[in-house]
Image (spheres, rainbow, N blue to C red):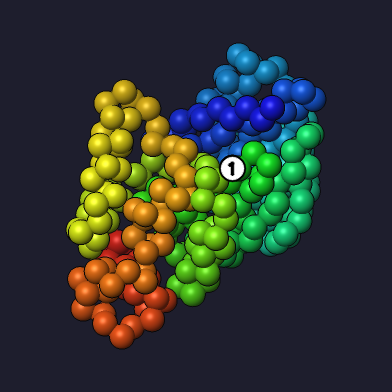
Amino acid sequence: MLEISIIKCLSDNFSFIIKDTENNLVGVIDPSEFNVIDYEIQKNHKKLDFILNTHHHLDHVGGNEELKKKYNSNVIGSKLDEKRIPKIDTLLSDEDIFRFGNFKFKIIHVPGHTSGHICFYCKEEKVIFTGDTLFSLGCGRIFEGDFKQMFNSLNKIKVLPKDTKIYFGHEYTRKNLEFCKKYDASNKHLKEKESWINEKFKKKQPSLPVTINEEINTNIFLRCNKSSIVKTLNMEGSSELEVFKRLRDLKDSF
């Protein structure tokens, strides 16, 4: 069994502790900070075999050095981030397989937010860790790549099985919802989504995981082919990529 624990870090980050219960292997994905992760490890596991990083930004690797020093963990990340992820040991490329005990994680290279950004996808468990590429109702800002790269990266995730659960890197869901409501106002799925989000926040629970199918129905950045959105933007005759670019620009100043 693959156990997944959601750990809230910093102001709005999510880190994830994963465990192969049969083989007693423990890993952490995107450890934002040392103290919070170390507390959870000491409380529940007493060991940390792997540190997995989706990309090099400090709020996703901030705990790497101290965690590796304390637990002698193997640090996993993109080959393209060899010089940028602290204490990296194992370098992975697109479509490589990372074996975590009984579980196989396929590496999906998703440039856009950063040039070396990767996702960890486990087909058997129907889960994907998307870092800062895909959020609920949103996508990451484009810092090192370009619009086409990010658009293509999102489409790589979009075509995965619809019941795949998405674990993303930040709690941006409520603000993302407001943006989607503004430019996809006729989307009936957003009302259902809003009720679900409000209930989560009322209970002080994180707004994840979500499924690929939910995002296809509600995430405006995965809906650039919808005529109602195109019409709202006055972009009839434009390509999906052009619509995506416009939406990303609007979101940056939203």
Q: Is residue 94 above or below residue 232?
A: above
Task: Please tell me in which quadrant of the rendered image residue 122 appears.
Answer: top right
* Viewer-nearest residue: 197 or 94: 197
Quarter of the rendering occupied by the N terminus: top right
Query: How many marks on residues?
Result: 1
Q: Residue at x 76, y 46 (%)?
A: 98
Left of 23 or right of it: where is 218? left
* Viewer-nearest residue: 220 or 254: 220
**Horizontal and vertical percent position of residue 141:** 42, 60
Query: Which residue lies under the disc numbered 1?
Result: 127
Left of 75 or right of it: where is 32? left
* Viewer-nearest residue: 3 or 118: 3
Q: Residue at x 68, y 42 (%)?
A: 124
Left of 183 or right of it: where is 77? right
Q: Secondary structure at mark 1?
A: strand
**Horizontal and vertical percent position of residue 69:** 73, 31
Q: Residue at x 48, y 50 (%)?
A: 212
Left of 214 or right of it: where is 60? right
Quarter of the rendering occupied by the C terminus: bottom left
**Horizontal and vertical percent position of residue 113:** 50, 61
**Residue furthest top as drawn:** 43
Q: Is residue 230 visible?
A: yes
Q: Residue at x 30, y 61 (%)?
A: 251
Classify mark 1: residues with Cα within 10 Å, few (<14), some (14-19) or many (20+): many
Q: Is residue 48 visible?
A: no
Q: Is residue 11 above or below residue 146?
A: above
Task: Please tell me in which quadrant of the rendered image residue 13 appears.
Answer: top left
**Horizontal and vertical percent position of residue 51:** 68, 38
* Viewer-nearest residue: 45 or 216: 216
What amino acid is found at the position of numbered circle 1 in the picture?
A: Val
